[in-house]
Image (tube, grey):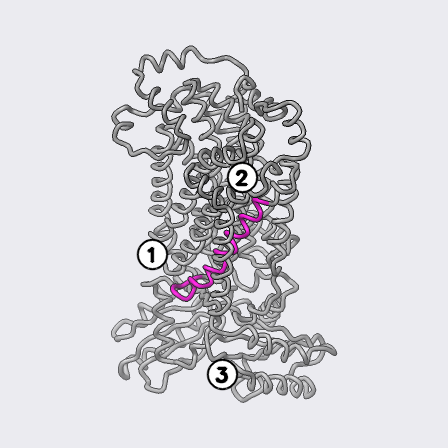
Amino acid sequence: MAALARWCVRHRLVAVVVWLLAFGGVTAAAAVTGSAYSNDYEASGTESGAATKLLQRGFPGLGGDSDTVVWHVTSGSVRAAAVEQTMTGALDKIADLPGVASVSSPYDGQGAGRISADGHTAYAAITFDHGAEDIKKSEAEAVVHTAKAVAGDGLQVELGGSAVALTESAGGHTAEIVGVAVAAVVLFLAFGSLAASVLPIATALVGVGTAYAGIGLLGHAMTVADFAPMLGMLIGLGVGIDYALFIVTRHRRGLKRGLSVTEAVTNAVATTGRAVVFAGATVCIALLGMLILRLGFLNGVAIAASLTVVLTVAASVTLLPALLSLIGMRALSRRERRRLAEHGPQPELPTGFAHRWSAFVERHPKVLGVVALAVMTLLALPTLSLQLGTSDQGNDPKTSTTRQAYDLLADGFGPGVNGPLTLVTHVDGAEDKLALDNLDATIRITEGVASVTPVTYNGGGDTAYFTIVPTSEPQSKKTSDLVDRLRTEVLPRAETGTTLDIQVGGVTASYDDFAAVIVGKLPLFVGVVIGLGCLLLLMAFRSIGIPVKAAAMNVAAVAAAFGIVVAIFQWGWGSELLGLGRAGPIEPFLPVIMVSVLFGLSMDYQVFLVSRMYEEWLETGDNRRAVRVGLAETSRVINSAAVIMISVFLAFVLSGDRVIAMFGIALASAVALDAFVLRTLLVPALMHLLGGANWWLPRWLDQRLPRISIEPPESRAAHARLAAATDAEVADVLAEGDQRDVRDTTG
């Protein structure tokens, strides 16, 4: 790492130009090729996936996305001549728009079912040529504008569907701007130097910007969800600014101790840079753990997010040293430079609140440990009621046209019309057709069914489907119960004595199947991620206690963050006030992604906190001093980093996207709890209570484990001397205990 830092300092202009060329080249390539994102939630081997494929083969015309235009009158009827004339003209114009395959009007001979019983609401079905992921935003916007243009004079017109959702106004880049602005303020307050506060942000923006464009290119090679770039930016800005902050802090400490700019940069990268690389590796391992689930939808998300982390780490240890050498002593504030010139180099001692807090934790480890554990347990309790399921346009903000269309349909036709189920089967012979004709009547009297369309056959007569409207909304447990009832009771009886194999598809069925697949693989996934993370910490810190505590703390942070997400999004505590729509279940893929991200991020503070303790332990062999010094010297920078990361994550609530808002709140909550409760309270309290056992590792295991170096070379030499001592000698060192105050330790 030191050699890399020296090269970047000597060739600083080359390093900067290479990064700028990479950023410009990848961005230009992404602009030329365009994006190719796809939200394919289908899990292979599920019944709903089989139903979708069979329907597409038998009825190719149903392959395009189907959206709705809903209109409502508060007085009179939608059958009134003026209303019918207005809406028929609008629907005719929509039918002629590019990308629209067909429009089914409620005013034609077969559309009577699309007019509500009270006559106040009607809707038309719009079928596009392609699926929602392949529809151009301009085509969807043309449909929305054409329909909305006739609204007024007591006529309300709203639109719903996946294509229409593309036109919903999002927060643009407001989230990123707000997050970066808050981070800049925090950095300036922490450093007092404008140049030093700009560098972490510039480094993160270059790394994240390159990754953002790279994810766009990645979408052409594999399935990448449309929220992956935003998720990558969210993670990248948070960790990128923090990683650069840690390195700049160490660099500034070296300058204050009298090191030259080159020496300070080299020392910062050789020490803190190692921890940055290690922390980034843990984040990537946690993210890439999603690959073991073998779900194409999550593979793209995992690789996209990991790409962002890799590039931000690379920028932190290559671009940042070059920039630090360019600004020279301006990394210090004017007052700090003046003090250095007048009084000479002085060690930066941990004083003030950081010192007092470290001493306070040392004096009261039991009480503080119990308080921290109680807080985490209380916040984690809502996780026990976590419900995975469909989050649809009924959860959109009240002001959105998709939410208003959803509500109008639910009020006029019943909540189930927003999420019909589809029964699809291959047909072979007269016996199968007779069974299907009889099944129609059986389904109508099944509990939870509001209505069912007559069986429809394709042109070859070898494929048929029913459309069932449930009595409950798509995200309701009653609808899920209906899916189970059809699959386990109704349909098996109808298939008896025939060759029918009826598959149940639809929104609720597909999400339930997706959730079942994920839940089934979740224990393996969590076990692999925790196991790999613990193995890395074991090799780095040569201790069994450190990785075990890290795993426990990470699980606690994840559980508490989930509890907050459940309270806000599933229970609806403030979701409408935050503009996040009404309460609803949690998307099935969110737990996996959030476990990966949260587990990786929570490792960061563990690495930065314990690595400083480890340095002190290797030098002195005194656990009390190591914990005291480590906490005192890192708590301020960890708290500053946490404030930055929390600000960036919370800013993404402004994105207007419910999924991204979930990520933002979950990550912000986890980081806040991790930094202010776990790493600066519970972890040091436990380490004080455990004493020298924190650093215990059987000698036979120590000899066989490969070494991953976080500490600088001089600390590795100290570790070698300490490991060479006998167990009795180490015990004597621990028993003596150095009782000097934390301020006796130089920066």
- Between the C-alphas of marks 1 and 2, the distance is 32 Å
Residue 739, percent from left and from top: 50, 12
- Give the magenta range: 199-224
Please tell me whether residue 661 belongs to the stretch shown in magenta.
no
On the image, numbered disc 1 is attached to which residue?
294
Q: Is residue 627 above or below residue 459?
A: above
Q: Residue lying farthest front?
A: 10
Q: Earlier in the sequence, mark 2 or mark 3?
A: 3
* Residue 475 seen in the figure: no
Q: Which callout, 1 or 2, points to the residue nearer the camera? A: 1
In the rendered structure, the answer to whether residue 551 lies left or right of residue 401 reads left
Q: Is residue 113 above or below residue 659?
A: below
- Between the C-alphas of marks 1 and 3, the distance is 35 Å
Amino acid at circle 2: Leu
Q: Earlier in the sequence, mark 1 or mark 2?
A: 1
Q: Residue lying farthest right?
A: 153
Examine the residues drawn in magenta and state their main secondary structure: helix
Residue 62, percent from left and from top: 43, 79
Amino acid at circle 3: Ala
Residue 379's tag is: 2
Say which element carries label 1: loop
Please tell me whether residue 216 belongs to the stretch shown in magenta.
yes
In the rendered structure, the answer to whether residue 554 lies left or right of residue 658 reads left
* Residue 299 seen in the figure: yes
